[in-house]
Each structure stands twice: as structure tokens, then as C-alpha cells.
Amino acid sequence: MMSNIDIFMCPSCKGDLEVTNDGINCLSCHNIYRIENDIPLLFCPNEWDDSKRDATEVVKEFYENSPFPNYEDVENIGGLVQKAQRTFFANLLNEQVPFNIRVLEVGCGTGQMSNFLGVAHRTIFGADLCLNSLKLGQEFKEKNSLERVGFYQMNLFKPIFKEESFPLVICNGVLHHTSDPYAGFQSISKLVKKGGYILVGLYNEYGRLITDIRRIIFKISDDRFKFLDPRLRGQDRGEAKKASWFADQYKHPNELKHTIGEILRWFSETGFDFVYGIPNPKAFQTFKLNDSIFKKHPHGNRLDHFMTQFGLFLKGSKEGGFFIMIGKKKV
């Protein structure tokens, strides 16, 4: 934080910050923020009126008790890289995100993606509202001397970074757990530099239907029939990892769902051009491992989106109905 203090700001008044022996001080409103386990505690609660529901504290409590994803069997850089190499998306990012840039991961959870991207020569900022999750990421970082990775407790509705500070902002699997995903997107989109990129991963309204059906079955059967989820009956993961997945997928207190067309509207209304999607919004355009995810691709029409989302429904049994959209901020 000290070597990048120029991009930080007070989440309460947006004033400049300084790091001292006593903590982090705001030079404008004089708030003092603590540091715990080398993690700056810069979380600032929302100041919404009673007409707007705020799920932040409920979600925060959930992840304090059930940090996700679990670091089970991942103790060093080699293990983390090996795990990431089995995930095409992590591999794709690592291959195509340039070196020597600042990257912000909003809602980094336990920081596995932040730590993975930080293995290469990048400066990574991992921000999350859950301190217990951040501590797991920080512990791995310190154990493996990942000096270019930093973790921060932050409310995405009250950013701790100045506008246009990052050429790439990643927010994967986060916004659909907030009270107002679009307002959350507006908030973090301001942190992207002109000409920079934003990547958001969300639950799809149609792709999530099978998961919703399973959730009902688990609820009325007192969590029996877990074999209905392919990841829970697989033998390639331990019990801790299965428990973490089950809690995140089926016990989350706040979950919303979105469509391709909706996210394209978000992009348009906040000054972003669509660049790439996984799966591809253009029907029958299959994903290829050598695709350039930061090069502009066609976003298709409503029929394309219907076909793509129908495919998500068919695959939702295994993947949880998840989709990714990447946008480029207009200059």
C-alpha cells in the first residue's frame, strides 16, 4: 500500500491517506483505519436509507463463517499453479493479462486468483469485505513471498481506490450477491482507466435453473441427495472443499441472477464496449483456447442470446449457470 499510496483514498470522504505506525490516517476527515495481519481494514458501511435493502452485513457474516474457495491441498505456489492450470479461465487470464500492470480483483474471497496472477510480474490488489477470507489469502501470500500482492478489506459500494486507477478490474462471482448489482457495477467501473477493461462473472437467469431446483430439493429433504450435484459426488476434491462449494451454491443468503442482454445494457450505460463473453453471446461461436479475450468480438442479437443461454441451462447441472462478460472503457 505504501508504494502505491497515490491510488488510495478514504472510503468515507475520498480524502488522501497516509500509513503510520498507528494505522492508516485520512488527511481530510482524520478517520483512522486499523491494520490486522498486515491487511488494511478499510471497510466502510453503506449509508442507504431504510427504503433500500442492504444485504452487505448478511453476506459478510456468511463468508466470515464459510470462506470460499477453500485452500485445501494448496500449500505453495506449485500447488496453486497446478490447480489453476486445471481451470481454463485462470490459465487464459494468466496468459493474456500483461505483466507490469496494476490489477484489481474486487470480491477476491480467499485470494486464490489474486495470488495466482501475482506469481507473474504484476501488481495485484485483492479486495473483499470478509476478513477471514482475506486472512487465508494473506497467509498464503506471506508463506510464498508474493511481494506484489496486497489484500484489503473493502466495501465495493465504498471503494478505497481513486477513479481510473486500474487498466483491469476483475469482479468474478460477486455482484449477484449484493443488494444492488448494477449500482455495484457502476461503483467499480469508475476504477477502470479509459481504454482499460472490466471483467464480471455472474449467475445467469436461465443457466441457474437446475441449481435452483436442487436447492429446493436440499431444503425440503434436510440436505439429503447431495449426489445430485456432480461436484459433490466427485472424488477429485476433499470434504472441506465440498462443504465450501455446497455452502456457496445452496446456502447463500442473497443471490440474484442476470442475463446477457442486461449486462450489455450495463456496459452501454456506463461507457463500455462489449469485448468478449464466456460463453460467447454470439450463438454457435464456440470458445477456443487461443481466443483473444481482450479483442473485440460481436455480441450477437436476442436470438443469439437465447440460444447461448439455453446452452447454459443445459450445462448448468455442472457449472452452476455462470457466465463472464468483458468490456472495454471508451476513451
Image (tube, rainbow, N blue to C red):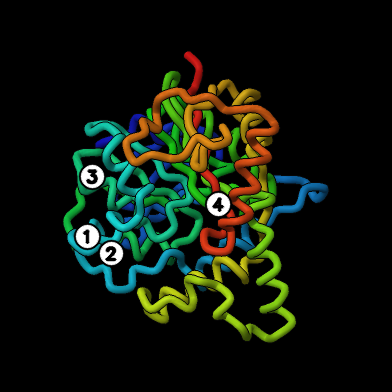
Question: Which residue reaches farthest front?
Answer: 284
Mark 3 / mark 4, whichever is N-terminal? 3
- Mark 4: amino acid: Phe
Q: Residue at x 53, y 31 (%)?
A: 189
Specify whether 96 is left or right of 264: left
| Mark in front: 2 vs 4 | 4
Q: CA distance from mark 3 to mark 2?
A: 14 Å
Q: Secondary structure at mark 1?
A: helix
Q: Secondary structure at mark 2?
A: helix
Q: CA distance from mark 3 to mark 4?
A: 29 Å
Q: Are marks 2 and 1 in contact (CB under 8 Å)?
A: yes
Q: Secondary structure at mark 4?
A: strand
Residue count near mark 1 (Cα–Cα under 10 Å), binned few <14, some 14–19, many ≥20: few
Q: CA distance from mark 1 to mark 3?
A: 11 Å
> Which residue position is annotated with label 4?
322
Does residue 204 lie above or below 36 as drawn? above
Looking at the picture, how far across and down is residue 9, in whole percent? 45, 35
Q: CA distance from mark 2 to mark 1?
A: 5 Å
> Which residue position is annotated with label 1?
142
| Mark in front: 3 vs 4 | 4
Q: Secondary structure at mark 3?
A: loop
Residue count near mark 4 (Cα–Cα under 10 Å), binned few <14, some 14–19, many ≥20: many
Q: Residue at x 38, y 78 (%)?
A: 235
> Which residue position is annotated with label 2?
139
Does residue 28 lie above or below 317 as drawn? above
Mark 2 / mark 4, whichever is N-terminal? 2
Q: Is residue 2 visible to us here?
A: no
